[in-house]
Image (cartoon, helix red, strand yellow):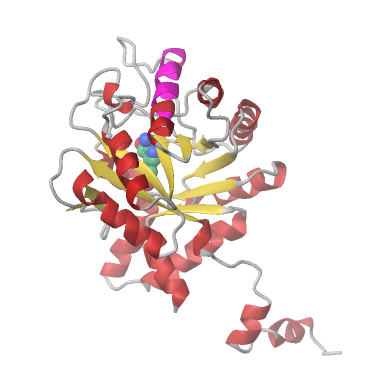
Amino acid sequence: MAAFPLTRLRRLRQTNELRSLVRETKLSIDQFIYPLFISETVKKSTPISAMPGIFQWPLSSVTQEAERIYKLGIPAVLLFGIPKVKNAEGKQAYAKTGIIQKAIRLIKKKVPELLIITDVCLCEYTDHGHCGVIDKKGYVKNDESLPLLARMALSHVEAGADMVAPSDMMDGRVGAIRKLLDTNGYTNIPIMAYSAKYASGFYGPFREAAQSTPQSGDRKSYQMDPANVQEALREVEQDIREGADIIMVKPALAYLDVIRQVKEKYNVPLAAYNVSGEFSMVKAAAQNGWIDEERIAMEILTGIKRAGADIIISYFAPQVAEWLRK
Ligand code: PBG
């Protein structure tokens, strides 16, 4: 027996092989989802300035990008659409000829094995930029928004989406979507619910990418207060009851305790969204030479997994695929 337990703990840390043998958390590319921004207003892939390496894609080249993602071993993409025309009801969100509906058909034709998950939310499609329809005072009308969100989800599935991901945070939207999908014969399509979605400053760069900043007010009346975790558990419980198949916590990095508590309390597949601000911070510091990008990104993503996430949605996914291959 060694004199100090510390000696025993360190014995297995001496080589790469030993460390790998006893490693508790391993990242695997087949549990990553990569977000894709598809825009009706650009003619060629257009860089998003606050998110180095991330682009808005026109329909004409998005399938090429989808193919690259699939070849890297990333199993799924999460689609966001930027329409040319926005209006109060976000009509392009559920139009058969909407940007996402077209993109799904194109991608499915070119790369049928790639899982297509779609963001279901009105904010990119409404002229006021809120996630549902609003009243005269600018307050989001919950129940009036539900049928529109359900129609949006159904139109994605009719175009060929494999899964839908409501991110609007209206009460009852998982149930409304489930019901409409089921009555149309799509009982096999899973729902990944953004259950615990916080009103977060970490979405800043995304709003540039998706052109979805609210024209007035903010999202605090429907997204969660960053100070709350009990409330997150109630949101999760409600979504599970309404039929969610996968639960999501978003953002990830500042909410690792929420991920952990959800995982411990509910035994359901859990996704975490490593959001735009989390990505941009690492990129900016790395570009300044202040940190080692690969090391920090992998440490953060490992932390998210260690906290309890089964699935990670991340803008780093293509880089992770390459880092894991080394
Ligand atoms: C809403 C939506 C947002 C994100 C995903 N879906 C923005 C918001 O709620 O303001 C943020 C994702 C990110 O920051 O990477 N459609």
Residue 316 visible? The answer is no
Q: Tell whether 324 sits left or right of 56.
A: right
Q: Residue furthest top?
A: 136
Residue 42, percent from left and from top = 15, 44
Q: Residue at x 53, y 29 (%)?
A: 186
Q: Tell whether 110 sits left or right of 323.
A: left
Residue 252, percent from left and from top = 49, 50
Residue 11, percent from left and from top = 71, 87
Residue 295 visible? The answer is yes
Up/down of 299 relative to 235, above or below:
below
- Quarter for ligand 1? top left
Q: Residue at x 39, y 59 (%)?
A: 70
Q: Tell whether 27 sits left or right of 2.
A: left
Q: Residue furthest left?
A: 43
Q: From which residue to which does the magenta span run?
A: 143-153
Q: Residue at x 34, y 11 (%)?
A: 135
Residue 116 appears in which quarter of the rendering?
A: top left
**Which one is in front, 33 or 51?**
33
Residue 148 sits inside the magenta stretch = yes
